[in-house]
Amino acid sequence: MRAVGAARRRAAAASAEPDVALVLDLVAAGVQAGLPPARALEAALDALEDAGRGAQAGPAVPAALRRAAVQLTWGGDPWTAWSALEGECGDRWRPLADALLLSARTGAPAASLLVSAAASARAERRWAAEAAAARLSALLVLPLGLCTLPSFLLLGVVPVVLTLAGELLGG
């Protein structure tokens, strides 16, 4: 049973994209190590792809994100690169784009913006998981009641009623 669950998790991870917060943290680590933000993004994507080639298949790096990283590394216009990425991948990578664009536009330290965006992405994911758990508990009330109420009646109430009826009718 554990092997099946582990295999499912590996298959899901291989087909999914990498976690946005993880990529943000990896890029922040590269920037803190002294790499320019575009090169740090490219190095983070390389690291994710290298990890995906190991014994446990990791998530696939989107080709659009790789193209944006290469465009930025080669001096392309950041707004053009990120808008092309948004057109292909939607809003999923917006925290990364916003942090790097804000850094490029204002000169703010990219590492602190990336770390803050990663923390925000994790908090948002945690809130979504808590909301899903709350919805699940509300959805499980009816099936749980439908399963336990008949068993309670058959095992708790019916024997008492039969015993009382037997005593009243017999005595």
Image (tube, rainbow, N blue to C red):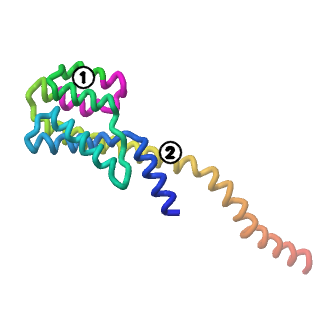
Secondary structure category for the residue under label 2: helix
The reply to whether the magenta stretch includes residue 89 is yes
Query: Which residue occupies 45% across, 46% down?
Result: 12
Residue designated by label 2 = 135
Amino acid type at circle 1 is Ala
The spot of residue 79 in percent (x, y) is: 21, 20
Amino acid type at circle 2 is Arg
In this rendering, the label closer to the viewer, 2 or 1 = 1
The spot of residue 142 in percent (x, y) is: 63, 50
Residue designated by label 1 = 81
Circles 2 and 1 in contact, beta carbons < 8 Å: no
Q: Farthest residue to the right: give it.
A: 170
Provide the residue span drawn in magenta: 85-101
Nearer-the-camera pick, 164 or 96: 96
Query: Which residue occupies 38% across, 49% down?
Result: 57
The spot of residue 27 in percent (x, y) is: 19, 40
Give the main secondary structure, helix, strand or loop, of the magenta stretch. Answer: helix
The reply to whether the magenta stretch includes residue 38 is no
Question: In the figure, is residue 27 to the left or right of 122?
Answer: left
Would you call the spot at circle 2 few (<14 residues within 10 Å), some (14-19), or many (20 or more)?
Answer: few
The mark found on residue 148 in the picture is: none
Q: Quadrant of residue 109?
A: top left
Q: Is residue 151 above or below residue 113?
A: below
The spot of residue 8 in percent (x, y) is: 48, 52
Nearer-the-camera pick, 142 or 72: 72
Query: Which residue occupies 68% across, 54% down?
Result: 146
Q: Quadrant of residue 82?
A: top left
Nearer-the-camera pick, 39 or 111: 39
Secondary structure category for the residue under label 1: helix
Mark 2 and mark 1 lie on one chain; the one further toward the N terminus is 1
